[in-house]
Amino acid sequence: MVEVKQIHKEEIFIVNDLAHQIWPITFKDILSKEQIDYMLDWMYNVNTLQEQVQTGILYYLLTENGQPTGFLGLEPNFPDADILRIHKIYVLPEKHGKGLGRELFNKAMDVAFDLGCHTIHLNVNKYNAAVDFYKNLGFIVTKEEDINIGKGYLMEDFVMELKVK
């Protein structure tokens, strides 16, 4: 059985744990190990994740037969009102191809409709295979951006959007 439920700051360590399982495999051919480690420490530090929850980021955990398998991080009204931003959407690599990413995306769509958002917005590394996943869902690339994240590292991203209304 697959379930997607919202989690709170007391459970956010599960997102940290999943990220440390997912990122080294997902990004091994795109980013150096040093950049992966740097980004995990920067973006998935438990304290940082808890602060995000306190400031309005919504986190959802996907479980399969009770086992944590993926997660979703959403921010309402970013960068503008009526837009839902997907900050994080990940599934364990060994679970890819089973429709679990779509389950997380469906939760994002439900939240977008519940909040009256007209657009879902995300950034994705332009070399990430997930670009095709998003295109298959109907997202379009609206621009490219390189974001300096410190220590000489860049996030080389596509900005993608999906109109939901």
Image: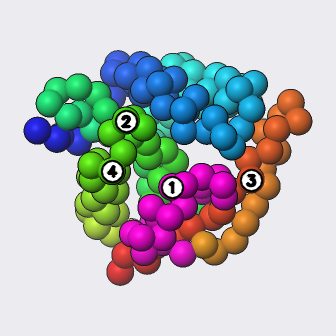
Q: In the image, is residue 119 above or below residue 96? A: below
Q: Amino acid at mark 4?
A: Gly
Tag 3 and tag 1, C-beta contact below 8 Å: no
Residue at 48 percent of width and 31 percent of height? 22
Residue at 27 percent of width and 49 percent of height? 98
Q: Earlier in the sequence, mark 1 or mark 4?
A: 4
Magenta residues, start to end: 118-140
Secondary structure of residue under mark 3:
strand
Query: Magenta span has 138?
Result: yes
Q: Residues within 10 Å of mark 3 (few under 14, many from 20)?
A: some
Give the labeled residue for mark 1: 130
- Residue 132 % position (x, y): 50, 64
Q: In the image, is residue 94 above or below residue 133? A: above
**Which disc, if any, is residue 156?**
3
Q: Amino acid at mark 1?
A: Ala
Give the labeled residue for mark 4: 97
Q: Amino acid at mark 2?
A: Glu
Give the labeled residue for mark 2: 94
Asked which quadrant contains residue 146, the reply is bottom right
- Residue 18 % position (x, y): 42, 26
